[in-house]
Image (cartoon, rainbow, N blue to C red):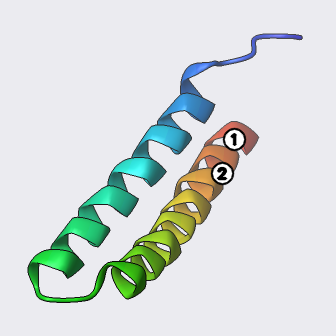
Amino acid sequence: MRKYNFIRPLMLIVSALLVKSLVTNLCMVMGMEPAPAENIGFIAMIITAIIIYSRIIRNRRK
């Protein structure tokens, strides 16, 4: 394992979970039911993970 960076995967996981909780809480504050709010939060988490992962890969190629 040559120069493995533990911060990158942790940053990916933490940011995805933070976005999920933030979006879920915002949806519930605006009056959504808990189940649809959880689904929207999960979609936001996946989108965030894809964006951060693509940035990590793009920076590693250079």
Q: Quadrant of the N terminus?
A: top right
Q: Secondary structure at mark 2?
A: helix
Q: Is residue 4 above or below residue 27?
A: above
Q: Residue at x 32, y 78 (%)?
A: 34
Q: Residue at x 54, y 22 (%)?
A: 7
Label total for image: 2
Residue 50, position as x, y percentages in the image: 61, 63
Residue 36, position as x, y percentages in the image: 40, 87
Q: Residue at x 51, y 77 (%)?
A: 43
Q: Secondary structure at mark 1?
A: loop
Q: Which residue is mark 2?
A: 58
Q: Which mark is residue 34?
A: none
Amino acid type indicated by mark 2: Arg
Q: Nearer the viewer, residue 3 or 48?
A: 48
Q: Which residue is mark 1?
A: 62
Horizontally, residue 9 falls left or right of residue 3, namely left
Snapshot quadrant of residue 22: bottom left
Residue 59, position as x, y percentages in the image: 61, 43
